[in-house]
Amino acid sequence: MPGRYRVNILEKVINVKKTTLKRAAALGLTALMAGSALAGCGGNNSSSSTDSKAASNTESKAADGAKGSVYWLNFKPEIDETLQTLAKKYKEDKGVEVKVVTAASGTYSTTLTAEMDKSNPPTLFVIGNQQGVKDWGDFALDLKDTAIAKELNTEAYNLTDANGKLVSIGYCYECYGIIVNPTLVEKAGHKMDEIKNFAGLKTVVEDIHKRAGELGFDAFSSSDMDDSSSWRFTGHLANLEYFYEEKAAGKTWTECPATITGEYLPNYKNLYDLMINNSLAAPTDLSAGGHNAEEEFKTGKAAFFVNGSWEYAAVSETVPNAVMIPYYCGVEGEEKAGLNCGTENCWAVNANVSKEDQQATIDFMVWLVTDPEASKTMVEQLGIMPYKNAAESTNGFLKNAAAYDADGCYVMDWATNYQPNVDEYRKDLVSALNAYNADQSDANWEGVKTAFVDGWAKQYKAIAE
Amino acid sequence: MSNTSSGASVKTAVDGKPPKKKKVKYSSGHSSMTKRSLRKWCWLFIGPVFASFIIGFIWPFLQGIYLSFCGKFNIISNAHLQGFENYVKAFSDETFFHSFWFTALFAVVSVVLINLLAFSIAYALTQGVKGSNLFRTVFFMPNLIGGIVLGYLWSMIFDGLLDLWTSQNLVDNEVYGFWGLIILLLWQQVGYMMIIYIAGLQAVPDDMIEAAKIDGATKSQTLFRVIIPNVMPSITICTFLTLTNSFKLYDQNLALTGGKPSRLTEMLALNISNGYSNMATRGMAQAKAVIFFIFVAALGIAQLAATRKKEVQQ
């Protein structure tokens, strides 16, 4: 019998005597049962405890005139610890239960999908862009005229749906651009004032790169194209193209356009070429990744680093005078350019939970942006909060952004947030840029252009209903 | 992935054995009391496993089939039946077809290479070479490392090697990606299959080989006429495992190439899971998963039936 024969083989595979095999099987079964029994107990325990919690909740609700609770599904793993402390503090101060759950990096959308289906869904969650408004807008409470909306000092980071419902409001914003180490620029015999446009930037960068051996540092830190770094070029840097396209058309996008023209792609190329060809890493090594751009900048091996305001805490440890400058790329009038500012950190309140929970959630939000201590903790983590009574920002790069603003420079908004089917779009762009990095030919740049412009239309179509 | 599936099949086969033995034992030695109480209490033992199987496999599987017929949904309780649209979309998705052919080619090449190599090594190591136990252990060890870790390790090795004669890296060229995946899978699975073949080879009765020798059979005649027909059960298992493993390959693919460049090295499982992250393509991904299941199941059964016919009875 083939079946029996096979068992013979497998016994030999495991190479143990039958008794040992039996004992092992018995042990395994016991372990499995114990495991499932434990799991069963655990499940029961937790459910009974939530049941009792729910029961006590309803009791206490009845007792002190309806007190809701807050459940925040957070999408920034780096602020989880801070939020847990704040939640505890809020519980101590106000006696309201705040539960904070953080989705693992890159899994927010699937976590939200699962959590929203539960009997106790999040009361506070994130809708960060127009796609989010389309997908989750129905779940969001209209925040117009709520206590938290009245605390805002700008409407710039709010998201509304087609009917004018205020779906989500920004709780912090961020900026990106080119981070510069002024000490190194001066060491190379240049002045920061020289960098007012692309021509100025190019002169300084190329001079530093040429003399890298003698100076002991290079111009740009490496521009790796692996997944941990490529977003700086396929997401952030690409923004300059979209933004100038918007600007030329005279209106900001409010939803994803079906096509883009790629009119400013030569400007993207200007800056991209400058970055990859005047850097510590050879362009051909970029697709494999493995360089640490932040470390290169922090240790003074490179004078320029493409990144955002969230890097301030890390960078200022060793380069306290680091500044952020705009993406100068050779567009006319760019002397008046500011940084790329925007956000995907927007709060939405769940419309499908009880009135008490909604109220408790809004109260908690107001506390976060008004309480001196709480807002200070938040600002330290998030950089800046666009609220009237929030603590002031200590982030140097955001101060740079404000200074550009005060000088009357235009803010480059995050048009990049509209990239259709973003993961796939960027993957194609990474592949095209990799081909270009390996061999900087015109044909390969055509490939980049195809991924950038035609790829947009292709992905727009792929997700259109 | 590959580990669990092969592990599972080992377990079921092993589990399949004791009851047979027990039956004999109980009916001869023990009273029917034991039998009755066993019948009474067996649910206590089977129950937990059965329940977790339903919760962890049957239910999600049925729900998955249902969702593949639903329109765009954000949460599962919001899904509404829509019809066959997702299937139409899936069949008109170019990336799905590319992944299919890429995976099919990959499966053919890897099944042939893995089995040839594994059998050859097993044959060599059963010829009484000195230190064959050490070799067996060493060849088996790669199988103990997880696919993600292997993927990242090998991507570094490949990039280092490619650097010697080209400016391209592994993720720049789908041909490199394809062979990279093949080499990785060979390295990982040859040892495992080798162990199964060794067991099969050791089970070939010595008197048969001796008889062949006396009859004047040459070494190659003995191999092809006596040994291989006798190890057909091992070949059945190994081809089944390698075939399904190749089709279901996911973590190695994700870590080694991640589908780069431009989804050209994206295999079926990765193609499906990439579609799930976007709400607009979620239903389609679900439909692809159902198609994928039917295909792999049919292929597996067909292969089992075909090779089983060749097995000889002892």
Image (tube, coloured by chain):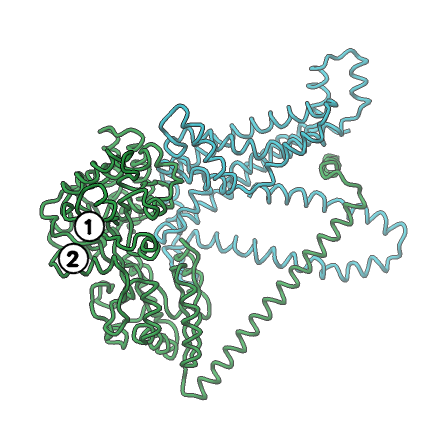
Chain colours: A green, B cyan
Residue underneath mark 2: A404
> Could you tell me which residue is drawn at 68 percent across and 24 percent down?
B123
Residue positioned most to the top: B216
Q: Is residue A244 above or below residue B103?
A: below
Q: Quadrant of the C terminus of chain B?
A: top right
Mark 1 or mark 2, earlier in chain: 1
Residue count near mark 1 (Cα–Cα under 10 Å), binned few <14, some 14–19, many ≥20:
many
Chain at tag 1: A
Which of the pair B115/A432 is nearer the observer? A432
| Quarter of the image where one finds residue A450 | top left
Q: Quadrant of the N terminus of chain B?
A: top right
Q: Quadrant of residue A399?
A: bottom left
- Residue A261 visible in the snapshot: no
For image coordinates 71% across by 60% down, the residue present is B43
Q: Position of residue A328 (x, y in %)?
A: 17, 46
Residue B94: x %, y % from top left: 36, 38
Horizontal side of B153 relative to B239 (left or right) equals left
| Distance (Cα) linking label 1 and label 2 | 9 Å
Amino acid tagged 1 = Pro
The answer to whether residue B38 shows anywhere in this view is: yes
Picture coordinates of residue A365, whole percent (x, y): 33, 73
Disc 1 target residue: A326
Q: Which of these two is toward me, A359 or B115?
A: A359
Please report contact status of discs 1 and 2: CB closer than 8 Å, yes or no: yes
Amino acid type at circle 2 is: Tyr
Q: Chain of mark 2?
A: A
- Relative vertical location of residue A401 with respect to residue A335 in this rendering, above or below: below
Vertical relation: A161 (above or below) B173: below
